[in-house]
């Protein structure tokens, strides 16, 4: 097997061509490893946040999102509305512990210490906060408002400290459409992807107050609501309860195609997996094209090496080298070339992922890439396979050279 010692020498002899060939393998491995690592990290982050959402919790929204999935960008989802009467129907379904209504007030003028912004306050019932079903919704300062209170407001962490130049404290006053509201509580920071959650900038008022504002302005239909939170009792399957909710709302709205969306944690995860799947296929195609071009480059490099070393092959055969030995020589050289590219790609991938995670922590992006040992091993083996596949044809050609003709080759 001494002839295998020739492989590193041959690769070094063609260093520029070898490095140009390696470049495609390196880029392809980086693309695959980083893509999968980011996808796994995003899945982990979303799964963690869904655990906070709670597997027994359901959110019901007006308008159909399900009909839009897979129908293309030009398809318009069916619009719909939810009403107080829908909540009454839902409350009678077995397995539901409680419901909590939400009413989004159209954008209002919010004023504090001479500064003005426009935001949409959310009218909410206190049981969503006090029930403990979503522990992330808890006050860092102050308290939760009561349903019968007037002119009080509960604000998110970022709204309190980042929206206006001056921070807002408990018992401070803000103005909503020129009406004075007292801040009774500031929520704990929830965070999430991109460093914050929309809930961290929320401004919540009692549901009854929001109802009065909307009705006075005539901005929504009478008894119309924006969303319903539902808690399913332990021992009941949330998917079964969701099916029953869909049946009841379909009957109430007298529609064949849903004009509402019932979202469970499983449903949300399915949609996220669908989106991630499309992204993965797209990026995987790009990485695959890169590796295909790399394979062609490796094959071209090996064909050129065979032609350059025709006389050398003739000498080895004259000294007793067998066809299978010549075949293994060039096949191993091709595999080693791609394996080296795979190793360099893995090292650079690790550095890129480490750098991304460092920046994510520094800027509180809320997402980290996860590079598993199995992914690293798989990527390395895949690069070796590319070398084997790309090297088969030139290696086979080299093994079939007639030694006399090879010695005469100029």
Image (spheres, rainbow, N blue to C red):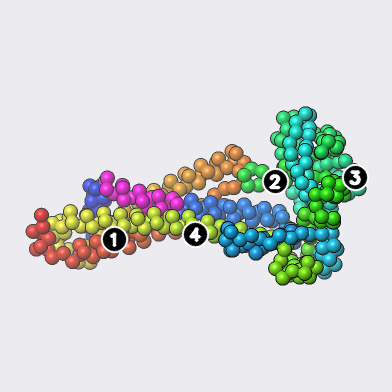
Q: Residue at point 75% right, 33% down?
A: 116
**Which badge, 1 or 3, comes first in the chain's sequence?**
3
Q: Nearer the viewer, residue 116 or 145?
A: 116
Q: Position of residue 401 (x, y in %)?
A: 16, 64
Res 149 label: 3
Q: Do the residues labelled 1 and 3 touch (CB within 8 Å)?
A: no
Q: Measure the alpha-carbon separation of dots 1 and 3.
A: 77 Å
Q: Where is residue 8 in the image (x, y as percent from the top left)?
A: 26, 51
**Which badge, 2 or 1, comes first in the chain's sequence?**
2
Q: Is residue 247 left or right of residue 147?
A: left
Location of the N terminus (image quadrant): bottom left
Residue 250 is one of the magenta-drawn residues: no
User: Residues in magenta?
Assistant: 15-31
Label 3, secondary structure: give it.
loop
**Which badge, 4 or 2, comes first in the chain's sequence?**
2
In the image, is residue 246 above or below residue 49? below
Query: Which residue bears the numbered disc 2?
Result: 198
In the image, is residue 206 above or below residue 250? above
How many labels sit on residues? 4
Within 10 Å of disc 1 (Cα), the crowding (few <14, some 14-19, many 20+) is many
Q: Nearer the viewer, mark 1 or mark 3?
A: 3
């Amino acid at each position: 097997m001494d002839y295998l010692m020739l492989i590193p020498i041959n690769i070094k002899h063609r260093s520029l061509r070898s490095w140009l060939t390696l470049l495609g393998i390196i880029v392809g491995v980086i693309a695959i490893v980083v893509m999968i690592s980011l996808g796994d990290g995003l899945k982990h982050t979303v799964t963690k946040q869904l655990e906070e959402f709670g597997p027994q919790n359901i959110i019901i929204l007006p308008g159909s999102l399900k009909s839009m999935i897979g129908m293309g960008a030009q398809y318009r989802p069916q619009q719909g509305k939810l009403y107080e009467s829908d909540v009454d129907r839902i409350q009678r379904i077995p397995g539901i512990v409680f419901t909590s209504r939400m009413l989004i007030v159209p954008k209002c003028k919010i004023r504090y210490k001479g500064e003005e912004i426009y935001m949409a306050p959310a009218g909410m019932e206190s049981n969503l906060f006090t029930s403990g079903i979503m522990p992330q919704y808890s006050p860092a300062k102050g308290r939760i408002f009561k349903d019968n209170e007037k002119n009080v407001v509960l604000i998110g962490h970022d709204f309190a400290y980042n929206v206006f130049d001056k921070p807002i404290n408990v018992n401070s006053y803000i103005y909503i459409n020129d009406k004075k509201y007292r801040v009774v509580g500031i929520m704990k920071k929830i965070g999430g992807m991109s460093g914050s959650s929309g809930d961290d900038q929320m401004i919540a008022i009692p549901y009854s107050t929001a109802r009065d504002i909307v009705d006075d302005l005539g901005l929504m239909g009478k008894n119309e609501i924006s969303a319903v939170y539902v808690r399913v009792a332990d021992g009941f399957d949330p998917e079964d309860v969701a099916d029953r909710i869909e049946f009841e709302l379909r009957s109430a709205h007298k529609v064949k195609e849903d004009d509402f969306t019932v979202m469970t944690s499983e449903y949300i995860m399915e949609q996220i997996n669908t989106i991630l799947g499309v992204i993965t296929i797209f990026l995987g195609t790009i990485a695959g094209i890169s590796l295909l071009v790399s394979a062609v480059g490796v094959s071209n490099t090996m064909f050129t090496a065979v032609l350059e070393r025709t006389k050398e092959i003739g000498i080895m055969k004259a000294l007793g080298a067998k066809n299978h030995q010549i075949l293994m020589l060039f096949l191993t050289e091709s595999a080693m070339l791609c394996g080296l590219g795979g190793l360099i790609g893995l090292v650079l991938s690790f550095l890129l992922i480490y750098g991304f995670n460092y920046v994510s922590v520094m800027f509180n992006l809320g997402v980290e890439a996860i590079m598993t040992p199995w992914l690293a091993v798989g990527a390395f083996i895949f690069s070796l396979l590319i070398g084997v596949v790309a090297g088969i044809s030139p290696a086979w050609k080299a093994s079939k050279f007639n030694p006399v003709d090879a010695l005469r080759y100029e």
